[in-house]
Amino acid sequence: MNQTQPIRDARKLGVSKMLLLGVQHLFAMFGATILVPILVSGYFQAACGEPVSRGLTVSVTLFCAGVGTLLFHVLSKMKVPAFLGSSFAFLGGFATIANLSTGKYAGLGANEKAAYACGGIVVAGLMYLVLALIIRLVGVKRVMHFLPPVVTGPVIICIGLSLAPSAIGNAQTNWFLALIALGVVIVFNVWGKGMFRIIPILMGVVIAYVAALIMNACGIANPDGSAILNFASVAEAGYVGLPPFQLAKFDINAILIMAPIAIATMMEHVGDISAISATTGNNFLEDPGLHRTLMGDGLATALAGLIGGPANTTYGENTGVLELSKVYDPVVIRIAAVFAILISFIPKLSAMIGTMPASIIGGISFILYGMISAIGVRNIVENKVDLTKSRNLIICAVILVCGLGFTNGITFTAHGTSITLTSLAIASIAGILLNIILPGNDYEFGVNQSGDENQGVHQS
């Protein structure tokens, strides 16, 4: 099979191979997606003396990711190969609400506080609809005038590089396993034949996990002395169970904490859709349209918050899989979404997948996160962004420093409420403002067709 040509119709591969591709996307998103409820539960346990037991759990999170992804695909005309997983941008908001101890929050338990936090997420998701309406009214061409490749390219680079510390942090828990996973991915991607060449991520996960099983059976531990595999959670989990949903509650304080974060995530959404467009060479910003992808992302986030799940966001990890496998058919993403929903009703299987060592996830992430940044570099190079112009150089420089320098974001207080802007939000806002302020913005989406083609957002 010649993988220099992308596969846009996965049906030609057959059902069994499509299912394997879906499993590959499932593994790509799984680690980061389930990490969010684990972290959030830790925030509430530290603040309230008890973890969240309803709503923000692994099973509810997987259900929200799967259903949210399918909803996104329906609203984007089944055209965009994007997977929606848990957003890390709202972690600061959850931590803030967990530590609220005045007014109605005094004496509230972890589940009640989490319910109010999820109410804020519902409002944050609905804010996407406002921007979607603006784009629908004024047109994507006018909006994209303020988002030329000199802005979107560096933002895409930051999306990948900002995730790099996470890859290193996971990999260093056991470098041997991380290097096995990384090595297998490289070998199968470069020298693999047939189907094996388009499922390198899955092969990396499987072979590295087998190595982990062997090492664990031989009594080998991680360098820090911890067990490589811990099956305690698997033994405790049931075989079948309904995810512990929790309806959101609404309070102005929680809304003011969570809703403004949507400004950041909407900017990240534009960067992610640009990255997917550049990867596949399709015109997703105009067809199905940025307003539709925003609406899909926003409604998926609102639905997740309504039933006690974390906010959703388009996942760069799965964009990396698209770039590596060259299979661009959105059907394989929808297969992964269905798998996520099914696993949410099988606690034992969910717990089994959750035993995946962090080191293996780190080794796989070396490739996935690097691919995202490489897409941003390609965006700039192929679109012939002239970096000899001071204007362009300044915009790129500021975006890169903001995106990589503000590792903890910026937290400020407005009307007594703590608000955190992530590094990617700061980078996006800075780039957009500089592009508006500095003279010389001659980019017009849809006019220079060859330039738009190189950006991956060409006319149909």
Image (spheres, helix red, strand yellow):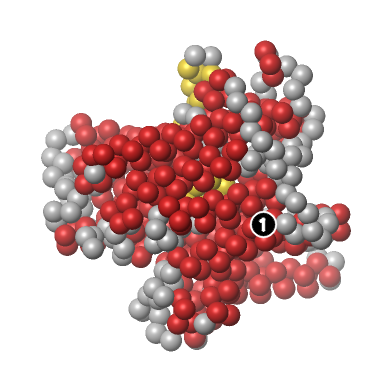
Element under disc 1: helix
Image position, residue 217 (x, y; %): 84, 70
Q: Which residue is mark 1?
A: 358
Q: Residue at x 13, y 53 (%)?
A: 447
Decide if residue 321 is on the left or right side of residue 445. Answer: right
**Foreground of the two, 338 or 320:** 338
> Where is the N terminus found, in terms of image quarters?
bottom left
Q: How many marks?
A: 1
Q: Nearer the viewer, residue 140 or 354?
A: 140
Query: Label 1 sits on what residue type?
Result: Ala
Q: Quadrant of residue 350?
A: bottom right
Residue 78 seen in this snapshot: yes
- Residue under the point 60% across and 62% down: 338
Give coordinates of residue 71: x percent, y percent.
50, 52
Q: Percent from the top left, x then y, of residue 203?
A: 60, 74
Q: Position of residue 175 (x, y in %)?
A: 65, 62
Q: Check the image and report above or below for 370 versus 267.
A: below
Can residue 174 be seen here? no
> Quarter-wise, where is residue 201 in the image?
bottom right
Please determine whether, in this image, residue 265 is positioned above or below residue 363: above
**Residue pictured at 60% horizontal, 26% vertical:** 250
**Of 80 and 165, the residue lying toward us:** 80
Q: How many residues crowd mark 1 within 10 Å: few (<14), some (14–19), many (20+)?
A: many
Q: The C terminus is located in which quarter?
A: bottom left
Q: Residue at x 47, y 52 (%)?
A: 72
- 218 vs 91, left or right, is right
In the rendered view, tell whether residue 110 sits above or below residue 202: above
